[in-house]
Structures are given as structure tokens and as C-alpha cells.
Amino acid sequence: MSSCSSCIMGNAIFITGPTAGLAPGNTKANLVILPKDLAYDFFLFCQRNPKPCPLIEVTNIGSPIPNLTAPSADLRFDLPKYRIYKKGVLVEEVINIDAYWKEDMVAFLIGCGFTFENSLIENGLVIRHIEENRNVPMYITNIPCQPEGVFQGNLVVSMRPFAGADVVRAVEVTSRFPAVHGSPVHIGNPEEIGIQNLATPDFGDSVTVKEGELPVFWACGVTPQAVAMSSKPDIMITHAPGHMFITDMKESNYSIL
């Protein structure tokens, strides 16, 4: 089981675990870092697939600073945990990427569903992975993304269970946040989207689905990691699933209502 953890260095506290439930009201983001020769293709991939990959910022070439969303941050150091993919293989998880950063790299920040969870809670809905102190469960589906250049692969979804009477409210609330995945892509039978067993997510942790509850699935910003495994770029740096970048931007900046 994963849980939110931290370490203390001097007077600073560094989060090293999943970020669900942290900094309520602030926009969270997924991270993808690529060399500039692949950046344009990935930018177009995000444009072709706005549901799983809603871009909220693209950095300047060689700059780890997200000037629009957190200008005092450094994307080499300011996430809890990173993943390094080489030719489609996860080779390492690290707590900073200083050793991997190159001057030709471009960072992409992609909207994250953790952003809308605060609004779900404010509307009286229980977020099971927060309640159980777990990472959100994520699954690779049988739904193909629209390919672009070298990038192709299947959609990844995150799952949150709700009682039938609460599903409509969950849809209404999350529909207000199209920049952070918006409304669900599937409700109910997971086998219809290629998920055989909710107890064995591809990323994150399993959570309890109680009798009378429906699994509700949202497009997920971990999709690029499944794409990395399918497309096999020489290198792709990402956040570790559930270990998000917390921006300075408020969730209201990305709400349409």
C-alpha cells in the first residue's frame, strides 16, 4: 500500500509519497519531459488527445521553470518522485532528475484529476483512495489514443467508486474542469474498456468498491507513460503515478463555472 510520506531536511519538509488530498484548492499536474526533437510530436499528440492530456503549460527549451503556473519552482526537484523510461522500459524511480536533465529538454505539465477532488469532497462525495490512504487506482484500457508521430498507445484511466445516487453529482462536478480531464469517460462494467480485474491496477493501489457502488473512470494523465511503453522513445521522464506537481494556480482557474 502506498501512503503519503515526507522527509525533513533542515527546516524544509519534502513530500515523497502520493499527493492526493494535499494542497486542496491548488491545481495539480502530471509531468512529461522529452528531448526537443520529440517535443513537437508530443505537443500534437496532446492536442489530438485532450481528454487524457490537457496541457496547462509547456516550458521553454532547456528550462525547468514553469513560468506560467509556478514561476518559483524547478521541475527537476519539486515533485515527490519521478520515473525514467528508456526505450519504453521503466529503468528507475528517483526523487530528483538533476542527473538526467539536458539542455535540449522540454517539460509538459498536463492537468490532473486530483485537482477536481477537492470540489467532489466539498459536494459531500467520499474519495475512496483518500479515505483509505492509498494511491488512486489507474488502469490501461483497450481504448486507443489518436496517434501522432512516434507516439501511440492506449488510454489510461483513474477510477473512483461512488454509490449510484452520487454518480450524477460526480459527473456534474467534474464536467466543470475540462482542463483537468473533465467528465468521466466510462461508468460501470470495467470489462467494456478492457479492465479485467479492478483489484489489480496497472498503476497505483486497489481500493474498496462497496456493494451498490459503481466504478467511475476518468481519463488519466498517466496515459503518456503507457504511450512511452508502446512508442519506446529513447528517453521520457515523467512523474511517478500519483506523485503530482502542485502548482500555484487555484482550481478555480481551470473551472468553466
Image (tube, grey):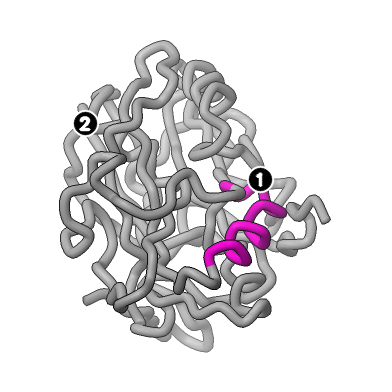
Q: Nearer the viewer, residue 15 or 225?
A: 225
Residue, disc 1? 179
Residue, disc 2? 88
State the residue at coordinates (34%, 83%): 132
**Secondary structure type for disc 2:** loop
Picture coordinates of residue 97, whole percent (x, y):
37, 50
Quadrant of the image containing the N terminus: bottom left
Picture coordinates of residue 11, whole percent (x, y):
52, 88
> Relative to 59, is 105 on the left or the right?
left
Question: Few, some or many C-alpha atoms within 10 Å of disc 2 (few <14, some 14-19, many ≥20)?
Answer: some
Q: Is residue 237 visible?
A: no
Picture coordinates of residue 252, whole percent (x, y):
78, 61
Q: Is residue 171 above or below residue 107?
A: below
Q: CA gap, disc 1 to disc 2?
A: 27 Å
Q: Nearer the viewer, residue 63 or 240?
A: 240
Q: Is residue 36 above or below residue 253?
A: above
**Secondary structure type for disc 1:** helix
> Relative to 216, is 11 on the left or the right?
right
Q: Is residue 190 magenta?
A: no
Q: Nearer the viewer, mark 1 or mark 2?
A: 1
Q: Nearer the viewer, residue 163 or 5?
A: 163
